[in-house]
Structures are given as structure tokens and as C-alpha cells.
Amino acid sequence: MAKNMQPIVKRCKALGISPAYMGYTGGTKSDTIRNPKGQMRRKQSEYATQLNEKQKVKFVYGILEKQFHMYYEKAAKAPGQTGEVLLTTIERRLDNVVYRLGFVMTRREARQAVNHGHFTVNGKRVTIPSYLVKPGDVIEVREKSRSSAMFKRLLGEDAPVFTLPQWLSREKNTLKGTVVQMPKREDIDLPVEEHLIVELYSK
């Protein structure tokens, strides 16, 4: 299976986004500005700007080109604004939902955890990170996986509290989350101008 192994902080800097959108917090040496004048770049071409927006989404969600193009083709045929449909569809990926529910710290961890079969959807084990959830779906940590350190930290008095998007719900000290409704554009906090992606593909 193809994997996106790009260095997180370096790639985030190149795309102009914070590593926080990848689930990474805290400063690193890479945050140091060694050459302030290095920020003075030439104005990007229209194509470069559009391509950058697409690369943001692909990198943050860990999607490769072939699959991203498939999402776009489906979004273009669906009712509604293509850019918004594209983003909300990608937001429904199981690996992203697992991350959004706070079961793991990053989307990369989420993708690996789903691949390893740690989660069920409506009681059935799902090992496909790109699986698209729908309203009413119940995502739960598999019974056999609950004793692992990865999930034990989510239970008890000191369990971390996560801010969930409105389209998802999860009670504290549980390893179960529910898809309340379809995600909306405002539920996606990634700073991306999706209309530029549509313009890129429309050429």
C-alpha cells in the first residue's frame, strides 16, 4: 500500500500551514527563522497558487493523487458546490473521524490504527482508512484493543478532553463515538480555498 512519508514540519512550512492541523503541537528547531529575507518570495503564479491549495488537502489528510482525483470526480458530479462537497467527503474518511474523535493524536496514527483493525463501525471491524462514514454510524474501539496503552489513556479521571466538531459526538471516558450528521464546510478548520482546487481541475 502506498504511503505518504513526507517530513511533517518541513512540508507544513512549505505549504504555509501550521503542524497543529496535522495533530502536532509544540515548537521545534524547524520553527526557527534563520533568514528573515527568505520569506520574501516572488509572487506565485495562478497555477502554483491553485496547486498549493490542492497539496494542502492531500498532505493534511494523507491522500495520494489518484485517490484525490477520484474524490474530485465524484464531487463534480454531486449536487452542491464542488469544492465544499470535495472537502466534506474527505472529512468523512474513517481515519479522519478516528482522529477527530480523539482516539489518536494524529491522522497518521489514525490511518495505521484503522489498518491494524482497532476499530469497528456499527459493530463490524473495518480496516479501510478511506471508508466513508454516514449519519448514525457508531465508531468504537474494538474490544480486543481496549487494553493497549494507546486507548487506556482515554479512560479514567485523567482522560484528556477533546473539542469535537458538531457533526460528531463522544462521551468522556468512553471508546465510542457517533456520527450525528453530515459534516458542513464550517466544520473543517483547515485554511484552504477549495474554489482554487476546482479551478485547477477545470482547466
Image: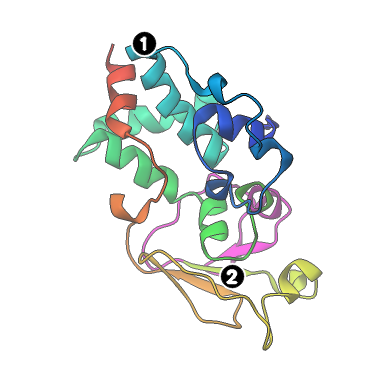
Residue matched to label 2: 140
Q: Earlier in the sequence, mark 2 or mark 1?
A: 1
Can residue 132 be seen here? The reply is: yes
Task: Give the camera-side residue of 100 and 70.
Answer: 100
Residue matched to label 1: 45
Residue 11 position, x and y percent, is: 61, 30
Image: 82 above or below 116: above
Q: Residue at x 76, y 72 (%)?
A: 144
Q: Residue at x 57, y 59 (%)?
A: 98
Count of number-bearing discs: 2
| Colouring style | rainbow
Can residue 184 be seen here? The reply is: no
| Neighbours of disc 2 within 10 Å: few (<14), some (14-19), many (20+) | many
In-image side of 9 versus 57 (left or right)? right
- Find numbered disc 1 in the image and state the secondary structure of the residue it sits on: loop
Image: 142 above or below 60: below
* Residue 27 on the magenta segment: no
| Neighbours of disc 1 within 10 Å: few (<14), some (14-19), many (20+) | few
Q: Residue at x 61, y 56 (%)?
A: 126
Secondary structure, magenta segment, majority class = loop
Residue 5 position, x and y percent, is: 70, 32
Q: Locate the N terminus and report the quarter of the image it occupies.
A: top right
- Amino acid type, residue under disc 1 in the picture: Ser
Residue 47 position, x and y percent, is: 36, 12
Q: Locate the C terminus and report the quarter of the image it occupies.
A: top left
* Residue 112 on the magenta segment: yes
Q: Residue at x 29, y 41 (%)?
A: 85
Point out the stretch of residues depicted in magenta.
110-137
